[in-house]
């Protein structure tokens, strides 16, 4: 069950998510990363999976997930291809030049496209991470979720979004900062999954996993400034024509914990309890009332965590001046 930690004041909230307090030295393997969300009711889902997200397809803007896994992967592939072609036509840097040829060569494109849409290969594979990360940080819907190594940066994005929602007339009860143990064995890298589970791509039921993605930041100023990384969702199985059902990260972790509980029921008491204690701290949620969102932004600004620091540009410096007067 997800552990929810509530705070009544900004001071208490900042103390609870402070790096020196949140890193749990009682766990043998723990390194937390963070994500802020402006509304605690929102699910932890990648942007391309969310209802209402406007995704630029090949012929139209798509505002929902697709009916099948095949169609969903087709949409994401087409979006990435269009993004790469647009970047190149305007002279922007491509993180992986070989992908340009793979995406534009008819033969290579068709082969790769078929592997992904037939669910014969994990999507996305490692070679696509940097391109997807670049797109994600500039507003392209992808299956990468933004996370950060810094809890205060996560709090900034939660507070900023919460204030924007309120200014738009939406009722928001609380904002959240999530802490995820990136070393948890519940997070499964595709290479490890495919190695350990025989014939995983032939499974007749969908197998969903999440894993951490770290990409180079030297060419991505936003990623560098935000100390960013990502959490990615991958599905497996001979299920290309099955109905596509997105699984939120919290649901995935709860299901994995339940599986561990079942496996540990027959194990020795000490071992079972040790595994349970470690993985129950895999993900935590810290909540603060939306009434304190502006105050939270004010306190973070004192630590130089603001628009101009997160999105380094002259325009962002001007936006910070307005942000301080909200």
Image: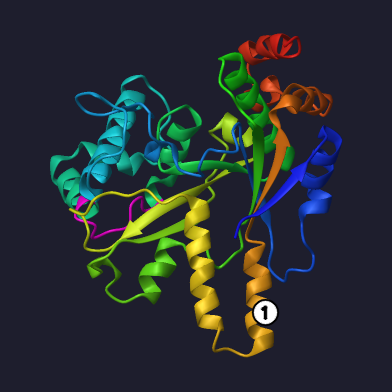
Q: Secondary structure at mark 1?
A: helix
The answer to which of 162 and 72 lies nearer the viewer is 162
Residue bearing mark 1: 273
On the picture, is 38 further left or further right than 6?
left
The percent position of residue 42, horizontal first and vertical second, equals: 53, 38
The answer to which of 259 and 153 lies nearer the viewer is 259
The percent position of residue 41, horizontal first and vertical second, equals: 55, 38
On the picture, is 307 further left or further right than 51?
right
Q: In terms of image quadrants, where is residue 283?
A: bottom right
Determine crowd level at label 1: few under 14, some 14-19, many 20+ residues with C-alpha closer than 10 A. some
- The residue at 36%/53% (across/down) is 125
The percent position of residue 120, horizontal first and vertical second, equals: 23, 60
The percent position of residue 304, horizontal first and vertical second, equals: 79, 26
Whether 238 is drawn above or below 262: the answer is above
Q: Quadrant location of the N terminus?
A: bottom right
- The residue at 25%/69% (across/down) is 203
Q: Quadrant location of the C terminus?
A: top right
Whether 227 is drawn above or below 291: the answer is below
Q: Which residues are magenta?
A: 117-126
- The residue at 59%/24% (across/down) is 171
On whether residue 94 falls in the magenta region, the answer is no
Q: In terms of image quadrants, where is residue 226?
A: top right
Whether 147 is drawn above or below 203: the answer is above
On whether residue 120 falls in the magenta region, the answer is yes
- The residue at 68%/28% (across/down) is 159
The mark tally for this picture is 1
What secondary structure is the stretch in magenta mostly built from? loop
On the picture, is 57 further left or further right than 297?
left
The answer to which of 40 and 108 lies nearer the viewer is 40
């Amino acid at each position: 069950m997800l552990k929810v930690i509530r705070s009544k004041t900004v001071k208490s909230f900042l103390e609870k998510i402070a790096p020196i307090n949140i890193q749990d030295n009682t766990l043998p393997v723990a390194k937390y990363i963070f994500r802020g969300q402006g509304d605690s009711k929102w699910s932890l889902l990648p942007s391309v999976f969310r209802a209402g997200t406007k995704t630029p397809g090949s012929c139209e803007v798509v505002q929902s997930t697709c009916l099948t896994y095949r169609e969903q992967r087709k949409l994401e592939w087409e979006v990435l291809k269009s993004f790469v072609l647009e970047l190149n036509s305007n002279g922007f840097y491509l993180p992986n030049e070989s992908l340009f040829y793979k995406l534009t060569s008819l033969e290579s494109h068709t082969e790769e496209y078929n592997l992904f849409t037939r669910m014969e290969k994990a999507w996305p594979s490692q070679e696509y991470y940097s391109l997807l990360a670049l797109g994600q940080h500039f507003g392209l819907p992808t299956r990468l979720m933004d996370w950060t190594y810094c809890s205060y940066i996560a709090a900034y994005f939660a507070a900023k979004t919460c204030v924007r929602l309120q200014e738009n007339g939406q009722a928001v009860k609380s904002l959240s900062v999530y802490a995820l143990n990136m070393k948890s064995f519940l997070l499964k890298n595709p290479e490890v999954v495919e190695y350990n589970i025989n014939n995983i791509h032939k499974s007749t039921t969908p197998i969903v996993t999440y894993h951490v993605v770290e990409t180079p930041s030297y060419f991505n100023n936003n990623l560098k400034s935000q100390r960013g990384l990502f959490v990615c969702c991958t599905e497996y199985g001979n299920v290309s024509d099955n109905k596509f059902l997105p699984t939120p990260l919290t649901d995935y972790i709860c299901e994995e914990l339940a599986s561990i509980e079942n496996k540990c029921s027959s194990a020795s008491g000490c071992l079972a309890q040790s595994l349970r204690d470690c993985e129950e701290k895999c993900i935590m949620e810290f909540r603060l009332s939306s009434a304190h969102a502006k105050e939270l932004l004010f306190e973070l600004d004192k630590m130089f965590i603001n628009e101009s620091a997160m999105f380094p540009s002259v325009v962002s410096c001007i936006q910070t001046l307005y942000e301080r007067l909200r």
